[in-house]
Each structure stands twice: as structure tokens, then as C-alpha cells.
Image (spheres, grey):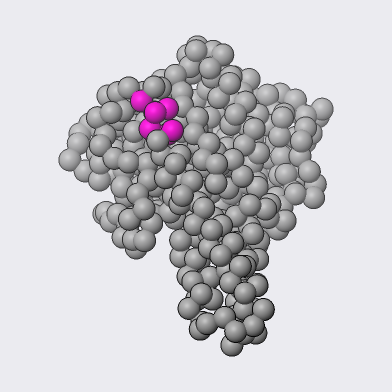
Amino acid sequence: MTALRFLLACISLILAAFVVIPAPTVLLFQVKLGVTELGHWFVLLPVLVFIMGRRKYHLDSVSFAMAAISALLFMSTSIRASMFATEASSKMRAAFPESGTVSSKPFSFGRIWSFGEPSGSKPETLQYFQSGGADLSLDFYAAEGRKPAPCVVVLHTGGWDNGVRQEFLELDHHLASKGYAVALIDYRLAPTSPWPAQWEDTLAALRFLTDRADDFGIDPKKFVLMGRSAGGQIAETVAAPGTQAGIVGCIGLYAPADLNFAYQYANKKDILNSDKLLRQYLGGTPAEVKENYDSASAYGLVNEKTPPTLLIHGANDDMVWVKQSERYASQLKANGVKHIFLKPPWATHALDYSWNSPGGQLTTWAVEQFLAAVTQ
């Protein structure tokens, strides 16, 4: 029993360590994401160490100490989320006083133990564009109980060279139930289709939705672009110039806003091989295709016409440096753009992958608050 207890304590501590240390591979990043956002479930491992009988040997005391440290690390996310909730609420009220119409909280301890998810009707799948032999489709979720409704256009993750639109569906169902139409769109992928193909695809989707606004029950003057990671870069870049009619807001989740900056600090040995991703997405290096890096960087496109923006980026993001959103928020502020930047101190990339986790709760709350403010 002593040896088994020690083994379990070692496993617990190794897993818990990823709450605070960087992940060196994609596989270990997935472990880190799990223990960071679902630590309240992983804490059952050290609890098991505590209940495996009385301490008899020195090794048992070591196991108890390791288990105690593990439990604290596993629960630290929820504790920090509870503390951050007050800061997030204050920032939201200051940036968007209109958001006060939504009565919800950024975090609930009770909800992290829940398995409940929002349900909704199946979306309607439609082809919206065809280019270069690629058929691009979107999944449209009609708003419940509201016409014409604001429409959230969502761009998926995937490093620009992979990914599918059907991800993080819980939030889509939730928004539809709250009276927002949601359109999940395809976009062409690199390296077959480098930038600005993705910009063109997003505009094509907006034209398609605008032309059929009456059929879909949406308000063509109230589009909000929302993207995660690679999709966030596209959403921010399309929205930043402020020249696209109908866009009233932009939501960028853990996204790179400045690809010149990203290439400058890209590391061939990082878990994404960012150097390669950027070159195949943009068609070369900044020295070779500077115009593509510039036109794909929302950071350099911000002006006084840029629509209101919500940024969420975890302080411990292992894939996209949080400094990307920090710099973008500063640029928005310098240009007088209404915005809010939330930097949850515990979070890594894809913090909202689990609907009921601390990151999932914060994202849902912030998105709903932001939408209420910008689509009034």
C-alpha cells in the first residue's frame, strides 16, 4: 500500500506541475490544458492518496506532502478564477456599461462540477462560396425568439492549415438560445490557399448572410466577428480597418494580432513550429512578402473606425504569446477604440474548450456581456 500510495502521489504531482510549467509538446499541452481547466476533477487523485489508510512509514509522509502540493495546484485554477471574476466584472462595467443588462457571473464554483451543456436545434448547413475548386460551407444557427437578430460569425482554430468549423458548439447553442444568430464558416486553408484567401472567404460569408438576411431573420447591420487562435487573427484583421459595413464588434480569443511580431519571435523548436506555419500561410518570410504580413496584421490596421473589440488571452498561453493581445489592446487604446482585454492568470491556449470549466465560464460570460453591449 505504501508503494502504491507513493506511485499515485508521484503521478499526481507530475500532472499538477503542468499547471505552472510550459508544455514542451502538443501532446503534453493537451495534458496541461486538461489539468488546468479540469483540475477540480484531477484533485480526486491526491484525495485518493489521503484516504489510502494511515501513515506508517516515512515514505507515506512524503506521499502525503506530494499529494497536498498536487491538490493545491489542481484547485488553484478555480481559486484564481474566483478571484479574477471580480476584476473581470469591474473591467467590463468600465469598458461597456451597457453590458449590465445581462445578469450572470464570470465564475461559479458550483458549475465546475456540472456535466450540463446547453442544447439547441441542429443548424442549417449551406454552401456560401466556391473558389479555386473549394466549396465553402457554413452552419447557421437561427436565433431563438428574436427577429431580426444580431449575427455572430465564427472562424475556427487550426493554425491556418487545418481545423473544422464544428468546434466549441456549446457556446453556439447558448448564444442562439439567448437571441443571437450564429454562423460557423469554413475558410480555405494554407498552404494550398495562402493569405488573403481567408480574408476573401470571410467577406464572401458576410455578403451571403447579408443578401439572405430576411430569410435568416438576421439584422445585416449587426454582425460580430468572432475567432479563436488562427480564426481570431482573421476576425481581427477583417474587422480592424472599420470599412466593412455591418460589423459592430469583434471578439478575438487567444489570437495573434501582429504577424510581423509573431515571425520576429517565432521559434522553429516551439510546439507549433510557428516559423513554418507563418511562411506557408503568408507565402514566405516578411522580407519576401511584407505586404502579406502587413495586410494580415490587425495591429497595423487599427484606426478610429475599428469596431468595439473583446480580447481574451490566457497569461500562460503556450501556443500564442499573450503579448500579442497585450500589444493589440494597447494599440486599440491608443486609437480610442472601445475595447476590453481580459487576461486570466491561470489560463493557457484554448481555455474555453470545456463549457463548465473556469475558462469556459469566463469566456461565455464575457462574450454574452460584450454582445449585449455592442448589438443594442
* Residue 156 located left or right of residue 24: left
Tell me: residue 178, above or below residue 337: below
Which residue is at 39% across, 28% downward? 90
> Picture coordinates of residue 15 (x, y %)?
61, 65
* Residue 207 located left or right of residue 123: right
> Residue 277: which quarter of the image?
top right
> Residue 365: which quarter of the image?
top left
* Residue 219 located left or right of residue 273: left
How many callouts does the rendering have? 0
Tell me: residue 28, above or below residue 278: below
Q: Is residue 25 visible?
A: yes
Of residue 76 and residue 132, the one placed in the foreground of this image is 76
Q: Quadrant of the C terminus?
A: top left
Q: Is residue 298 visible?
A: no
Of residue 286 and residue 32, the one placed in the foreground of this image is 32
Which residue is at 57% across, 80% downward? 55
Residue that protrudes farthest toward the bottom in the picture: 1
Q: Quadrant of the N terminus?
A: bottom right
> Residue 338: which quarter of the image?
top left
* Residue 264 located left or right of residue 161: right
Q: Residue 334: say if magenta.
A: no
Q: Residue 89: say if magenta.
A: yes
Which residue is at 82% across, 27% downward? 287
- Highlighted magenta segment, given as a residue range: 87-93
> Picture coordinates of residue 285 (x, y %)?
79, 34
> Picture coordinates of residue 214 (x, y %)?
24, 32
Tell me: residue 223, above or below residue 162: above
Which residue is at 62% across, 78% downward? 60
Of residue 12 and residue 319, the one placed in the foreground of this image is 12
Residue that protrudes farthest toward the left in the picture: 145
Of residue 265 and residue 7, the one placed in the foreground of this image is 7
